[in-house]
Image (spheres, grey):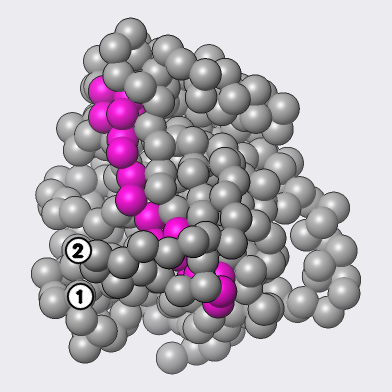
Amino acid sequence: MEARRDVTDEPGRRTDQGKAGKGTVLVVGSANMDLVVTCERFLRPGETMLARDFATFPGGKGANQAVAAARLGARVCFLGKVGRDAFRETLAEGLRRDGVRLDGLLTDPVAPTGVALITVDARGENTIVVAPGANGHLTPADLDAHAALFAEATVVLVQLEIPPETVERAAALARAHDATLVLNPAPARPLSDALLRAVDVLTPNQTEAAQLAGFPPDGTTTAEAAARQLIRRGVRSVLVTLGVDGALLVTAGVVAHYPAVPVTPVDTTAAGDAFNGALAFALADGQRLEEAVPLANAVAALAVTRRGAQPSMPDRAALDAFLDAGAAATHAVAR
């Protein structure tokens, strides 16, 4: 089935792909140092447990997604804020090594670099607590000072680990410069209709989709029902990630399910980031949304077979080998 991405001719509104393909991805978001412990199971309240091991990995949803897109071959620029500490140098060196431009990597004089405290259980599932640090000090004025980065971007990719007013400004700048806006609404929080109307592709997981649509996040609302509600609020395309069940694409005229690539997970920490970075790469490369989803599914599947956030992101050679070995990128099933 070939699903259709809606096109609108509203004045000032992007059409199917915004700027031409083979373009630049601008990631506006967070950079954290991930402090990861691996345990047999998750703790109960008041319990102490000895971990199997401990490791640190460069992370943060924004930085993870920038690395995911860059390793696949996209031209990527990162716009975010870190602290004046040792973690800054580690994060900057990692991004630079993967070819991410750091024109927009800012340093806060007071706040520390953000950290994420991550527990991974024996099944590869995780819990995450984030201390935003300098990420919470990225302001709309910072974005305005780097508006030239938006002018050259084909795709702008944003998450919600930065202040809401900064997300709103990123959306406005993306629209002003005719870039395709992909919003990964994680961690979920209420979003205004004005922001949703600026979004070309919204990429929540099923829980986030229900919360954003105003439904209880208890699993009783289907992904399709939540996505349709978000479409009614003005989003052009909603792409709900469903973990082992793949992804569901919903527009005003199309509902299509893309099955996941089956793998045995080792660490699911950055699955969503791998998916979003790959999606941004494909869109900037000129692919239609319907073509981009199978590739994003495959990248996410390969990422969860590796430990860590940024270290788990595959490059194009690893992805091609994964697909050649029989991990076929699955295509949409009409609904």
Q: Position of residue 45 (x, y in %)?
A: 24, 68
- Tell me if residue 218 comes above or below residue 274 in the rendering: below
- Which residue is denoted by mark 2 in the rendering? 212
- Tell me if residue 106 comes above or below residue 39 in the rendering: above
Q: Where is residue 172 in the image (x, y as percent from the top left)?
A: 26, 32
> Does 325 sit left or right of 319 as displayed?
right
Give the magenta-colored segment's residue range.
Answer: 119-137
Residue for point 60% across, 55% down: 53
- Tell me if residue 27 comes above or below residue 250 in the rendering: above
The three-letter code of the residue at mark 1 reads Pro
Could you say which is closer to the camera, residue 101 or residue 85?
A: 85
The three-letter code of the residue at mark 2 reads Leu
> Does 225 sit left or right of 320 as displayed?
left
> Does 42 sit left or right of 133 as displayed?
right
Could you say which is closer to the camera, residue 58 or residue 216?
A: 58
Q: Alpha-carbon neighbours of circle 2 within 10 Å: few (<14), some, or many (≥20)?
A: many
Mark earlier in primary sequence (1, 2):
2
Q: Hey, which quadrant is residue 111 in on the image?
A: top left
Residue for point 44% across, 53% down: 118
- Which residue is denoted by mark 1 in the rendering? 217
The quarter of the image holding the C terminus is bottom left
Q: Alpha-carbon neighbours of circle 1 within 10 Å: few (<14), some, or many (≥20)?
A: some
Residue 127 on the magenta segment: yes
